[in-house]
C-alpha cells in the first residue's frame, strides 16, 4: 500500500471513533524519517492536552493493530495540529474563513512568481468548491489541486 493510500485508510478507519470521543481528526501523515512514523493530528473544542493525546494514541493503536493493514514497523505519534495547523478539508476552509493563511502552490498561480508561496486572507469556498483568498486586496479563486499546503498564519 502506498503512503497516501495508508494515510487515507487510517483517516477513514479512525474518523468516526475519534468523533465519538468528541475529538476531531485533523490530519494523518505517514512519513519515513529514520523509521516509519504514523502521525495523527487531533483537536477538540478548547484544545487538546497530553491526556487527550495519550487516550487517543491508545484507542488508535488498538484499532490499527486489529486491522493490521500497515506492513512493517512504524511509530505512532498523536499530537495537536499546532497553532499553524494545516488546512485541507472543506470544513477547515469554512471554519477559518477570515483568518490569514500561508499558501504554498505547486507552481506560481497565473505565472506570477509572488504567487508560489504567499500569505493571504482566507475567505472560504466558492459554490463549486474552489478556495477564495484575498491577496493584496485582490480576490483569488484557486483550485485545491494547485495548492501543495495551506496553514494558518502565525506571527510573533
Image (tube, rainbow, N blue to C red):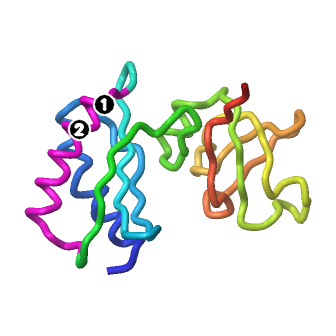
Q: Mark 1 touching mark 2, by CB under 8 A?
A: yes
Residue 64, position as x, y percentages in the image = 17, 60
Q: Can you tell which mark lies on residue 50?
A: 1
Q: Within the magenta stretch, is there residue 65?
A: yes
Residue 51, position as x, y percentages in the image = 24, 29
Q: Quick one: quadrant of the C terminus?
A: top right
Pick whichever, 135 or 80, lies toward us: 80
Q: Can you tell which mark lies on residue 142?
A: none
Circle 2 sits in a helix, a strand or a loop, which is it? helix
Circle 1 sits in a helix, a strand or a loop, which is it? helix
Residue at (36%, 22%) from the top-left corner? 45
Please name the predominant secondary structure of the magenta segment in the image: helix
Q: Extreme left residue here?
A: 66
Q: Residues within 10 Å of mark 2 (few under 14, many from 20)?
A: some
- Which image quadrant is residue 22 in? top left
Residue 112, position as x, y percentages in the image = 91, 59
Q: Within the magenta stretch, is there residue 91?
A: no
Q: Please determine whether, in this image, residue 38 is positioned above or below residue 57.
A: below
Pick whichever, 63 or 131, lies toward us: 63
Residue 63, position as x, y percentages in the image = 13, 55
Q: Please determine whether, in this image, residue 52 is positioned above or below residue 141.
A: above
- Identify the magenta region: 48-70
Q: Which residue is mark 2?
A: 54
* Residue 130 relative to residue 57: left or right: right
Pick whichever, 88 or 84, lies toward us: 84
Residue at (62%, 43%) from the top-left corner? 151
Residue at (25%, 72%) from the top-left corner? 73
Q: CA distance from mark 1 to mark 2?
A: 6 Å
Amino acid at each position: 500500500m502506498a503512503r497516501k493510500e495508508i494515510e487515507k485508510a487510517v483517516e477513514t478507519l479512525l474518523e468516526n471513533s475519534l468523533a465519538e470521543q468528541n475529538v476531531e481528526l485533523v490530519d494523518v501523515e505517514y512519513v519515513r524519517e529514520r523509521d516509519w512514523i504514523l502521525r495523527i493530528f487531533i483537536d477538540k473544542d478548547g484544545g487538546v492536552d497530553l491526556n487527550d493525546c495519550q487516550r487517543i494514541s491508545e484507542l488508535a493503536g488498538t484499532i490499527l493493530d486489529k486491522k493490521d493493514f500497515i506492513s512493517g514497523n512504524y511509530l505512532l505519534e498523536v499530537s495537536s495540529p499546532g497553532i499553524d495547523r494545516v488546512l485541507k478539508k472543506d470544513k477547515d476552509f469554512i471554519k477559518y474563513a477570515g483568518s490569514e493563511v500561508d499558501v504554498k502552490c505547486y507552481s506560481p498561480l497565473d505565472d506570477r512568481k509572488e504567487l508560489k508561496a504567499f500569505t493571504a486572507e482566507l475567505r472560504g469556498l466558492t459554490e463549486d468548491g474552489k478556495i477564495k483568498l484575498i491577496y493584496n486586496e485582490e480576490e483569488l479563486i484557486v483550485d485545491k489541486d494547485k495548492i501543495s499546503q495551506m496553514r494558518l498564519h502565525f506571527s510573533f
